[in-house]
Image (spheres, rainbow, N blue to C red):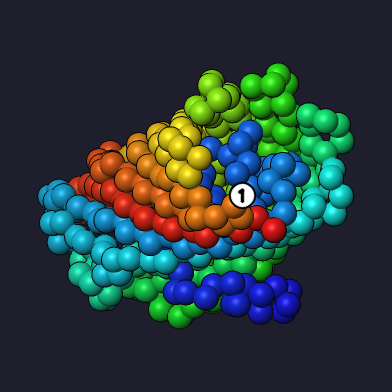
Amino acid sequence: MKLLRLAAAAALFAPLAAQATTGYFQHGYGIKAKGMGGVGIALPQDALAAATNPAGMAWVGNRLDAGIDWFAPDRGAEITAANGVPGRPGSYDANGRKGFLIPEFGYNRMLNPNLALGVSVYGNGGMNTTYNNNPFGGFYGGFNPGGVDLIQMFIAPTLAWKFSENHSVGVSLNLAYQQFGAQGLEGFDNAIFSSSPGNVTNRGRDDSSGWGLRLGWTGRVTPNVTLGATYQTKTRMGRFEKYQGLFAEQGDFDIPENYGVGIALKATPKLTLAADLQRINYGDVKAVGNPTDCLFAFTCQLGASNGAGFGWRNTTVYKLGVAYEWSPQLTLRGGFVTLRQPIPASQTFINIVAPGVVEEHLTLGLTWQLSRDTELSLAYMHAFEKKVSGAGSIPPLFGGGEANLRMKQNALGIAFGWRM
């Protein structure tokens, strides 16, 4: 995997860390899709199509796309008091780092009219919190600053085959790379809570790599209706050895299985409507999905084979998008994304470091045709503020009370496309 790590380092040409919008996945991939609610399973628009459905690469032609997203999450937590609580009640701001750059790149080449070979490079998303005033500071330790930083990215070589006039299939080999760091979790870095004390917090950055597959199908079932389906396997990643005392299975942190279906409708010659339904199985990755209850009941430890995780549940994401060709030079886009955020109210305490709770997103976008072969695309996303109030979230061991989470987000992206 040394070659993968070098390629990943080259791809991450800008500092990259993020709090993505559907848990820790992005709401869409490619600036065009991002401006249209993230839809793309049945609507390939550029050489980032493989990030959503590899079959779409058979329809986008010879092209190169490069873009970057400026992402600005606003996240934090609140601790409420109970009798004898040792923590410090109050509101805590996690915006020690305010903005992030997320690059993307795609290239596609038609080997013949029915066979496409391409590569898509994109950030899966991630998770970042930086508390200059650490909420865990009052809970038996936890020094400033506190928080976590998770980065995930893919390099996806893709082959797509149009096996009939109206249908295609595709496969991507997802070569994945991730980095993680944690600080300020000293209260959990002991033999009571961890199976590997000394490997919980303040170890700097660690990285791991792995691979998986994404499969897809796209079919034009009528002249105006296109359907699509896609499936991504769980991506098996190497362990974060520096954090084997934090994540279940001795530092294992796989990327979850996900799948979806989509439809695109050409309502008029200028108006396109599209919708995607996506399922993300966060709960099937032990480091993410295992609940924390056993940790505070002293029946499990962090880092153990069946140790405590973050208690995230599986979630379903609903995406709607519209595109309107205002003129031959200008296409306008809009969209809406919604989901049931993945953090149960009982699991908010440990998720102070990972408050990925936004649910509703509004997107806008456009593409301006610069010349016959070049175009410039813009996309804006706003995720409305969501608050999750804890319910029995801080255990009596820590004095009781509740941990409440909040988040809202903005993002602005730009991309250049070149038909070759």
Residue positioned 36% across, 54% down in the render: 411
For label 1, the crowd category at 10 Å Cα-Cα, with few meaning under 14, some 14 to 19 and many 20 or more, is many
Which quarter of the rendering shows the N terminus? bottom right
Q: Which residue is mark 1?
A: 46
In this rendering, the answer to whether 91 lies above or below 187 is: above
> Which amino acid type is marked by label 1?
Asp
Q: Horizontally, is 298 left or right of 152 in the view? A: left
Depth check: give the residue in front, 218 or 61: 61
Whether residue 332 appears in this view of the structure is yes
When asked about the image quadrant of residue 387, the answer is top left
Residue positioned 24% across, 54% down in the render: 77
Estimate the x, y position of residue 236 in percent, counting from the top left: 69, 58
Whether residue 193 appears in this view of the structure is no
Which quarter of the rendering shows the C terminus? bottom right
Query: Helix, strand or loop at disc 1?
Result: loop
Depth check: give the residue in front, 54 or 192: 54
When asked about the image quadrant of residue 12, the answer is bottom right
Q: Horizontally, is 62 left or right of 104 in the view? A: right
Depth check: give the residue in front, 22 or 301: 22
In this rendering, the answer to whether 394 lies above or below 360 is: below
Residue positioned 79% across, 46% down in the render: 160
Estimate the x, y position of residue 238 in percent, counting from the top left: 66, 67
Residue positioned 48% across, 35% down in the render: 325
Q: Horizontally, is 230 left or right of 205 in the view? A: right
Estimate the x, y position of residue 311 in percent, counting from the top left: 45, 46
Q: Horizontally, is 29 left or right of 62 in the view? A: left
In this rendering, the answer to whether 181 lies above or below 60 is: below
Estimate the x, y position of residue 13 in percent, counting from the top left: 52, 75
